[in-house]
Image (cartoon, grey):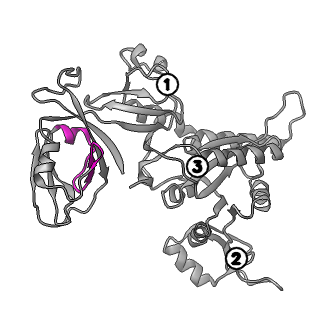
């Protein structure tokens, strides 16, 4: 669910250039995305900004219609089928038609609290298109921006979350695709990555109370030490972490037990499961196939443990969901000390690490430079403890 704030003020008009300061109050809505809108209409309530609500046969308040061109249609926040769960903290379940009308009395206009996580860096002082550089927001990858207004076609108003100034400033929404398209394209590897996903330059997020992440995802260049980190964590904390046992089509060796180090399956069975999208990753080695089945990760979660996976970045499009609730840690290559004879393999590791970080850095919850393995383990343990005890910004798709 997500929360929006409506400002209602009888007789006042919401403008993209100014706000009416008199006779204001706020209506805070808690919304479930695309709830069931089935059932007969027991009430139709039209709001002046172009939305019609209905109470269905389950006595739930549903968005029945949004008028094209109206304020709510231009904001793009509510959708037909969304369920309004609360108004100002008052639940709408089993409310009467008269009570609903009383809550929504007066002309309504949006003042929406939408938060997004920036997935790229932006400096207005270097943007040739912005008409007033001093009014622009400068942000980094991972910064949380509260969008105050999207009324203007080209410019949005927003402010950085958790900043001392809290000043509302402007940023040009069209700059996103232009900036990322011209900068990140040179860093993408030749194979298509996230090929079925749209290019997203910011991500809508919601703040949740402290909760434990279900999956620890270790990303990094090949040879950076992810496997060592994974094995160390599982050895130290077997009551906390576990690794999903892979499946393979190779025949078991002598004394190998099914389900201990590998699950042994036939080639036909594995191919069928792959076609059914039941594998997170898979590949072949010496005429045998190996892969990580999603069900093995789910079983670890059912045991109350955190699943540790060291995967390729492409796997994030499966894992970054509320079901797997991942904490994504990037293990960066050790720092190369100037003046010391540089090993070619270390140079390759450093270069690959830099490309991964620049390409996928907006998905990382934490970055650790693996200079000393013992220190890396301690920092990772502390980070997992901290994220389980603090409120967290997560993608809205994790919630509804």
Q: Position of residue 235 (x, y in %)?
A: 79, 61
Going from N to C along the chain, the mark reached first, 2 or 3, is 3
Instruction: State the SS at label 3.
Output: loop
Residue range highlighted in magenta: 71-90
- Residue with the mark numbered 2: 288
State the residue position of label 1: 163
In 3D space, how far apart are the residues under numbered discs 1 and 3 (Cα atoms)?
Answer: 39 Å
Does label 2 or label 1 sit earlier along the sequence? Answer: 1
Q: Position of residue 377 (x, y in %)?
A: 77, 48
Label 3 crowd bin: few (<14), some (14–19), many (20+), radius 10 Å: few
Q: Position of residue 36 (x, y in %)?
A: 25, 63
**Inter-mark Cα distance, 2 to 1:** 54 Å
In terms of secondary structure, where does tag 2 sit?
strand
Marks 2 and 3 close (CB-CB < 8 Å): no
Left or right: 139, with 282 as reference point? left
Which disc is residue 190 wearing?
3
Picture residue at 42% right of the left edge, 52% below the top? 397
Q: Nearer the viewer, mark 2 or mark 3?
A: 2
Q: Which mark is residue 141?
A: none
394 sits left or right of 389 in the view: left
Q: Is residue 88 magenta?
A: yes
């Amino acid at each position: 669910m997500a929360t929006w704030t409506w400002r209602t003020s009888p007789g006042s008009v919401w403008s993209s250039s100014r706000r009416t300061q008199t006779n204001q109050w706020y209506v805070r809505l808690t919304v479930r995305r695309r709830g069931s809108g089935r059932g007969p209409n027991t009430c139709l309530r039209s709001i002046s900004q172009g939305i019609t609500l209905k109470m269905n046969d389950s006595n739930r308040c549903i968005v029945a219609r949004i008028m094209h061109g109206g304020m709510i249609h231009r904001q793009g926040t509510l959708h037909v089928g969304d369920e309004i769960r609360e108004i100002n903290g008052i639940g709408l379940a089993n409310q009467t038609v008269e009570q609903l009308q009383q809550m929504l009395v007066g002309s309504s206009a949006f003042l929406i609290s939408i938060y997004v996580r920036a997935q790229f860096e932006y400096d207005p002082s270097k943007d040739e298109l912005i008409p007033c550089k001093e009014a622009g927001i400068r942000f980094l990858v991972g910064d949380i921006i509260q969008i105050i207004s999207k009324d203007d076609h080209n410019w949005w108003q927003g402010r950085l979350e958790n900043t001392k100034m809290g000043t509302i400033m402007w940023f040009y929404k069209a700059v996103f695709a232009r900036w990322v398209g011209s900068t990140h394209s040179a860093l993408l590897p030749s194979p298509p990555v996230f090929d079925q996903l749209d290019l997203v330059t910011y991500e809508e997020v919601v703040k949740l109370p402290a909760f434990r992440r279900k999956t620890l995802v270790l990303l990094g260049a090949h040879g950076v030490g992810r496997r060592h980190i994974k094995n160390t964590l599982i050895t130290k904390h077997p009551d906390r972490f576990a690794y999903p046992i892979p499946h393979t089509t190779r025949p078991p060796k002598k004394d190998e037990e099914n389900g201990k180090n590998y699950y042994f399956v036939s080639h036909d069975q594995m191919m069928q499961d792959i076609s059914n999208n039941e594998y997170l990753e898979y590949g072949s080695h010496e005429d045998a196939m190996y892969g990580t089945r999603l069900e093995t990760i789910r079983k670890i979660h059912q045991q109350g443990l955190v699943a540790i996976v060291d995967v390729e970045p492409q796997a994030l499009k499966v894992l970054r969901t509320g079901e797997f609730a991942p904490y994504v840690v990037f293990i960066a290559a050790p720092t190369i000390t100037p003046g010391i004879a540089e090993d070619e393999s270390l140079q390759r590791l450093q270069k690959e690490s830099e490309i991964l970080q620049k390409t996928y850095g907006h998905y990382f919850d934490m970055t650790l430079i693996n200079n000393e393995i013992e220190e890396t383990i301690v920092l990772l343990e502390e980070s997992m403890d901290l994220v389980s005890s603090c409120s967290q910004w997560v993608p809205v798709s994790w919630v509804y």
